[in-house]
Structure formats: C-alpha cells, structure tokens
C-alpha cells in the first residue's frame, strides 16, 4: 500500500494545475518526501451512489449528503439520502457552468465553478439561489471550518475566505517537508484538520490549517473494487464528507457506484 502511495504522490510536487476536472491523463507523480505517517483504511459500510454523478464536492449535514456534480450541461446541486443514494432534491446549473467544490455555512450552501470564477450561495432547505460571488482563480475544492471558507484552486495554495462576502482573508501554501503539494482538490474539515484529495490519485493529505504542513497521508487505493472499475465507466476519487457528530468519514468518486464509510487505520 505504501509503495502505491509513493508512486501516486504527486502531481503535486512537480506539476502545475492546468486542468482539473475533466478526464485528462494524470501528470507524472513524484516520490513523496520525508517520514510523514501514512494511514490506511477499513471499510465500515458501502452505500449506493449515483453512477451518473461526476462528484466534485460532498458534505454531510443533519443526516443527509449534499453533493456538487460537474461537467458542462450536467452540473448540479443535490440532496442525497445516505442509505439509498436516492437524489431527494436537485438544482441544475446553467450549461455554461462546470460545478466544483461545495461547503456549508449557517443556512447556506456555497458551490464553486471551475473556470467561470463564480460561486453560488443557496438556501440549504429550498436550494433557492441567494447570491453569487466572484474570484480570480480557478475553483476546485471548498470547505468550512465553522468561521471561514477554505478554497483550493489546483495549486499548492489554500485560500481562507469570508463566508458572507467571499473576500480573501488569508492564504497558506501546503507543503510536505518544505516542498509544495500541488493539485489540491476536494476539501473537508475534519477535527481541526483539512483533508484534501490530491487530484488524479487515491491519496488524501491531512493538512495543518495554520502552517499548511502535511501531517499525514491517507492511502485510499483499492477502495473501489476492480470489478466495479472494469464493469462501468468510473473516474477518480473525489468526494470527502465528514459526519462530525457521528465521527464518520465518507469517500466516493466521480461516476462511482458506491459511497464508502471508512475508518482510518494508524500507520
């Protein structure tokens, strides 16, 4: 497992983030530096997931999953039943928008777009659009620490933003033993850390939000079975959600037929 992680990491160390989120080939990864702990996982449960969902953002709130799906002409905001994978509520974006990361703050959901440099805020109950924000970079991942939004743009930089205005408050460069980790994609706030999946890999970085230093790696390789990969069109790992009350971590991917509740295994 650790050898697999070494081969996957990363894009991040050498390559720029030219393209997120279509199906372009992965850039050549580099060897990860240093003695950073590598966590495995144990699958606790597997749930149905819409295999037509090109997952770009995922979160768990009050018993439901909220999901942002991408691709032009297919992008949406969804409320999903965990146990069945049923889409309970959906808002379709205009075809010109390629939806990306998703975060929750107060009574709002905030959804990024990839290249349009616009984010949308919705009422969490009705999905009614409330306002929109602009930003100067690409939009990849989004999460919230309870006070600030945290955004990735495919580089090694994380941006901390005001959840009411979307103005930048601060930023931090993510590094592993001094080397920048690029291609930061889907984000989730987990017990005071930022979990960030590294685009086009099965690797998740555990990041200290104050310093940007990677505190650990999660090797999620093998999560989607070979049979599922061979029997249908699937893409990469790209959905992280955390149930803070239940201490449950969920992972899925683009066009994956399953969503997994996993437990981390210490190195």
Image (spheres, helix red, strand yellow):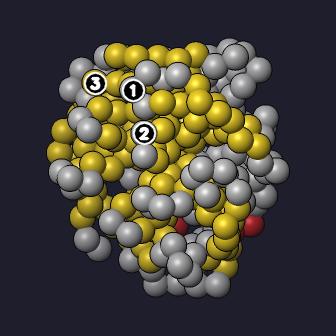
Residue 8 at least partly seen: no
Q: Is residue 215 above or below residue 154?
A: below
Contact, mark 2 vs mark 1 (Cβ under 8 Å): yes
User: How far is disc 3 from disc 1 in space, using C-alphas?
Assistant: 14 Å
Check disc 2 and report the residue beneath it: 107
Check disc 3 and report the residue beneath it: 81
Q: Helix, strand, or loop for circle 2?
A: loop
Q: Is residue 17 above or below residue 232?
A: below
Q: Quadrant of the N terminus?
A: bottom left
Foreground: disc 2 or disc 3: 2
Residue 78 at least partly seen: yes
Contact, mark 2 vs mark 3 (Cβ under 8 Å): no
Quadrant for residue 111, please give it: top right
Q: Is residue 265 left or right of residue 241?
A: left
Check disc 1 and report the residue beneath it: 125
User: How far is disc 2 from disc 1 in space, using C-alphas?
Assistant: 8 Å
Q: Quadrant of the C terminus?
A: bottom left
């Amino acid at each position: 497992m650790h050898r697999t992680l070494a081969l996957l990491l990363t894009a991040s160390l050498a390559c720029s983030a030219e393209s997120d989120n279509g199906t372009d080939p992965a850039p050549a990864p580099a060897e990860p530096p240093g003695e950073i702990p590598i966590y495995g996982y144990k699958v606790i449960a597997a749930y149905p997931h819409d295999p037509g969902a090109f997952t770009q953002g995922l979160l768990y709130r009050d018993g439901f999953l909220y999901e942002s799906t991408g691709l032009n002409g297919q992008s949406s905001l969804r409320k999903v039943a965990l146990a069945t994978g049923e889409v309970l509520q959906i808002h379709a974006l205009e075809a010109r928008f390629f939806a990306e990361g998703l975060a929750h703050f107060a009574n709002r959901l905030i959804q990024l777009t990839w290249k349009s440099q616009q984010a949308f805020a919705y009422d969490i109950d009705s999905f009614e659009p409330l306002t929109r924000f602009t930003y100067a970079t690409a939009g990849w991942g989004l999460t919230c620490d309870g006070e600030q939004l945290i955004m990735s743009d495919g580089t090694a930089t994380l941006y901390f933003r005001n959840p009411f205005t979307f103005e930048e408050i601060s930023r931090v460069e993510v590094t592993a033993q001094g080397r920048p980790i690029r291609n930061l994609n889907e984000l989730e706030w987990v017990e005071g850390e930022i979990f960030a999946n590294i685009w086009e890999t099965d690797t998740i970085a555990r990041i200290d939000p104050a310093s940007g230093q990677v505190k650990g790696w999660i090797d999620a390789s093998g999560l989607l079975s070979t049979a599922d990969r061979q029997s249908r069109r699937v893409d990469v790992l790209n959905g992280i959600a955390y149930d803070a009350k239940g201490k449950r971590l969920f992972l899925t991917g683009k066009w994956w037929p399953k969503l997994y509740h996993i437990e981390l295994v210490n190195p």
